[in-house]
Image (cartoon, rainbow, N blue to C red):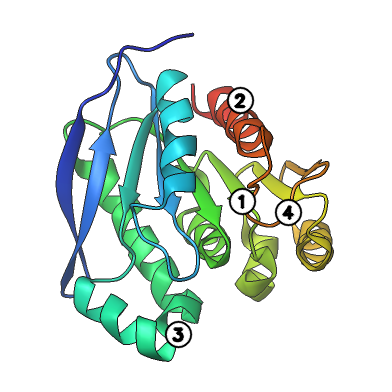
Amino acid sequence: MQAAKATTNPVEIPSGGVLLNGDLQVPSGAQGVVLFAHGSGSSRLSPRNRFVAGVINRSGLGTLLFDLLTREEEEIDVRTRQLRFDIDMLARRLTDAAKWTFEQDETRGMSVGLFGASTGAAAALMAAAELGSRISAVVSRGGRPDLAGDTLAEVTAPTLLIVGGLDDVVIGVNEQAFRQLHCEKELKIIPGATHLFEEPGKLEAVADIAAEWFRRHLD
């Protein structure tokens, strides 16, 4: 299904006394919306996540890309590299963003999915465990789901883990996390892809697989 091009709406999401900048796109007729949790040292402007979001939009679903850190926090993180690994804080902010989405006129009543990359995957899984049945699906791209720890066993949303076939270390931690998940689940390995899926056609494969997973569970 080819959806009409969605208009990007800048938004501000309150979380724990700060405002997080985001970009919300909701195609006409969308039944669901996918929230993106970016990876280590990245932001809502991540070209890889924006590419995947575009494919999801064209499939007829909405997307919300937002910054997990404020501008001031990003400046601190560039120096210390600590906040990007504060998974508890990132998960709280993603949970707050999901709750914000539940209440907005454009997205109220829609099914909600979470897409996490790198450390953002752990935040997405922890948020999914916290929100339970209010989250309809989770996708991890090159993620570190192992950083979600014991909360993996509490995730009920159908979960897809996507890993590059040449990303040996991350394959191992994803296989470990996969065994701890007790929900509907799938582990998809993209042959010939490294951690960032930079090889020709590999990110396109990720986007198509993720969009299909979300269409199946959010529509």
Q: Are marks 4 and 1 in contact (CB under 8 Å)?
A: no
Residue identified by numbered label 3: 81
Residue mark closest to the camera, 2 vs 3: 3
Q: Position of residue 2 (x, y in %)?
A: 44, 9
Q: Earlier along the polypeptide chain: callout 2 or callout 3? A: 3
- Mark 4 belongs to which amino acid? Thr
**Vertical comparison of 202 with 70: above or below:** above
- For marks 4 and 2, give the CA distance: 22 Å
User: Could you classify mark 2 by the number of other residues whose Cα lies within 10 Å: few (under 14), some (14-19), or many (20 or more)?
Assistant: some
- The residue shown at (78%, 63%) is 180
Classify residue 208 as left or right of residue 1.
Answer: right
Q: Earlier along the polypeptide chain: callout 4 or callout 1? A: 1
User: Could you classify mark 4 by the number of other residues whose Cα lies within 10 Å: few (under 14), some (14-19), or many (20 or more)?
Assistant: some
Residue mark closest to the camera, 1 vs 3: 3
Q: Are marks 1 and 3 in contact (CB under 8 Å)?
A: no
Classify residue 54 as left or right of residue 157.
Answer: left
- Mark 1 belongs to which amino acid? Ser
Q: Earlier along the polypeptide chain: callout 1 or callout 2? A: 1
Classify residue 55 as left or right of residue 154.
Answer: left
- Mark 2 belongs to which amino acid? Glu
Residue furthest out toward the front = 200
**Vertical comparison of 70 with 128: above or below:** below
Query: Which numbered circle lies on residue 194?
Result: 4
Q: Position of residue 196 (x, y in %)?
A: 62, 54
Query: Which numbered circle lies on residue 140?
Result: 1
Assign a secondary structure to mark 4. Answer: loop
Q: Are marks 4 and 2 in contact (CB under 8 Å)?
A: no
Residue identified by numbered label 2: 212
